[in-house]
Each structure stands twice: as structure tokens, then as C-alpha cells.
Image (cartoon, helix red, strand yellow):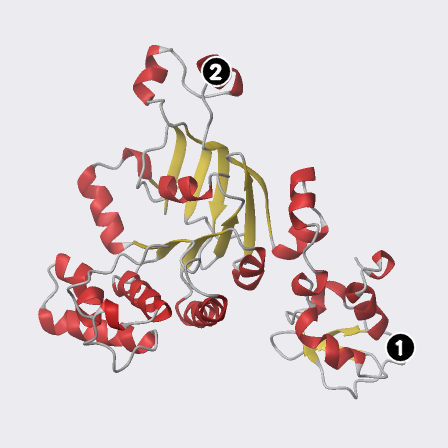
Amino acid sequence: MTSESDQPVITCESLYKVFGLTPDEMARDNIDAIDQAYLDRKNLVAAVHDVSLDVYPGEMLVVMGLSGSGKSTLVRCLSRLIESTSGAITVEGNDLLAMDEKELIELRRHKMGMVFQNFALLPHKTVLENIAFPLQMRGMKRADFVERTMNMIDLVGLQGRENSFPRELSGGQQQRVGIARSLAVEPDIWFLDEPFSALDPLIRKEMQDEFLRLQSILRKTIVFITHEFDEALRLADRIAIMYHGRIEQVDPPEKIVLNPATEYVRKFTNDVPREKVLTAGSVMDAKREGDVDTAKPVRINDRIEAIAEYILGQDIPVPVIDEQDQPVGMLHKDTVLGILFHDQSQQP
């Protein structure tokens, strides 16, 4: 994740999307901003309700909530696939809502990539042709777009399938084509709306692994929509939880689970196994006099779920090291036992 000194890539402030209400109607009602009293008076419900949010460079922000919470509407507002009713959105410091059609097309062609649940592949075109399509629309020379497309095919692991048609591919392979097509335009900002939800669980996990691998290489700024908490925990730098169009909380996964900001977030995360969320760094102790570094160390960002068996098999505390392989603390067996069996006294 990025440091707080970074300027946001995307910022939205007091954003509303109210279906059935236009800015012209607001002007006739002589209001500049929407409030709950106005919505009640007009008998309207906001699909996106007073959302203020920042997305930072290289961050994967996962927006989640139950069906109807407003998460898909939000990402469509942020990409301006639909028009917001009220509020402000800036992308790299530029006013998204003030852009004319030409400026918006240029932004999408050169800065934004989008992947949705529906793969939307062109059935009469091959893998190579599907991926190359947005590059052709840019007017790129054939030799250049073929080279770029083949690079994308290699990146997503579809070597040898470039001449296949969508009907000849599995669901996971089709999704890879959609991801490669989106990446071909080399977007700085990537919107993904439940891209893996149509896949069976095994392929879904494989695609998550592939997605994490790609992100480790490309470091895109990503807004990823899901309703699956396990998926959010695997992917997110931060999680934004939505409820009835509002953002209830935006925080790293550990803080979301351990320090819920609202009663809804507490209920939403109540059944999440702590070992899936907590890392060695979040529960380690400071190194104490007499602790011996003879056990194989674990890394500060290792999930407890992944290292629990190893920790429980040690008779001595296990050292924790940071990204530079420097010792930063010790992890004790009792701490891990407390997490696994939900002993609150052993948790932060």
C-alpha cells in the first residue's frame, strides 16, 4: 500500500446517485446539494448516498457490501459510465464531471481499464482479436498492436490459445481474455466489478492468485467490487464497506475486523475467522530478553492462517522479520492459540 503522503489518484466528495432525479430538477428546486430531508420530501432513495472517498496510487481498494448496497453504482459513477446526481469526482486532479465527451473518451482510452462480471467477449473474434480490439480502435499500427497483444497473452498465461474463439475457452480462460483486453491499453486506473463471481470456486481462487501476481508486477490503482469477504481479505489493501448507498467504513482488513466503526460493520464481519485477517505483525510481541532466534522466522505480513501450524509446532517464540529481513518482533504460541480459539484476552 502507498504512504499517506501520496496524492489520491481518485477523489470523490459528497457523491450522490439518485435514480429519477436530475441536476436540472435540483436546479428547479433551488438546491445545490442533496440532504436526507430533500430525499424524504421527494420520496427518493439514493443508490449512492453522500460518499466521500480517496483512492491512492498503486492501491487495491476493495468495495464490498450486500446486493443492493450501491457498490456497482459507485464504481460506475467513478468511471462516469453513469452520471452522478450531485457531488464531485477528480481523477489525477482533473474534474471528471466537467469533462466533455471527447475528454472522457480520451481518459478511458488512455487511463482507465474496466472488467465486469460479464466477459463481453466478441464471439466471432479470436483471443488475439478480442484483446487487440481496443488497440485497433486507437488507430495503432498492426505490427504494434499484435506485439502488445502477444505480450498480454503471455502475461495472463494464454500462450497457445491466441487463435481460439471464446466458445472454445473455459470460463477462467475467458476471464483472462477480458483482463488482458483491459490491460492492453496500459491503464493507470483499473475498475473491476465482481469479475470472478461467475466462476466456480476452484477457478475463482486461481484467478485471484493470477490477479495478485499481475498486481505485484503492474502496481495499478484498482477499485475492485465484490460481495465475498474471503475475496476481499485476499486482495485488498483497504476495504470500503457499503450499506444502503453509504460508506460505513474504509480501512485495512485488520482494522475493519478488529475495530468496526459501526454496528453494521460489526455484524457484517462478526463471523470472519480472525486467523484469515490478522498478520504476524499485528499480533507479535516486542523481542524480550532471553528470546532466542533459533526458529525459522516468519514475515511480518504473513497471515496467521498460513503460519499457525508452524508456530504451534515450535517450543520457543518465533522471530518475525520485515521486508528487509530485519527482526522486528517475536510471535508466541499462546497468541496464536488465542486467535484460533477466539480468546479475546490474547487478541489486540
Check disc 1: other Cα within 10 Å, few if <14, some if 14-19, many if 20+.
few
Amino acid marked by disc 2: Tyr
Horizontal placement of 311 versus 140: left or right?
A: right
**Mark 1 and mark 2 in contact (Cβ < 8 Å)?**
no
Q: Judging from the image, what secondary structure is the residue with disc 1 in? A: loop
When the figure is inspected, residue 286 is found, relative to residue 240, above or below; the finding is below
Residue in the foreground of this view, choosing between 318 and 210: 210
Select label 2 or label 1 by which is in front.
2
Amino acid type assigned to the residue bearing label 1 in the image: Glu
* Residue 138 in view in this figure: no
In the rendered image, which quarter contains the C terminus? Answer: bottom right
Spot occupied by residue 252 in the image (x, y as percentages of width and height): 61, 54
Is the residue marked by circle 2 packed among few (<14), some (14-19), or many (20+) residues within 10 Å? some
Q: Which residue position holds label 2?
A: 38
Q: Residue at x 69, y 78 (%)?
A: 298
Q: For mark 1, what is the residue?
A: 289
For residue 296, side relative to residue 99 (left or right)? right
Furthest residue to the right?
290
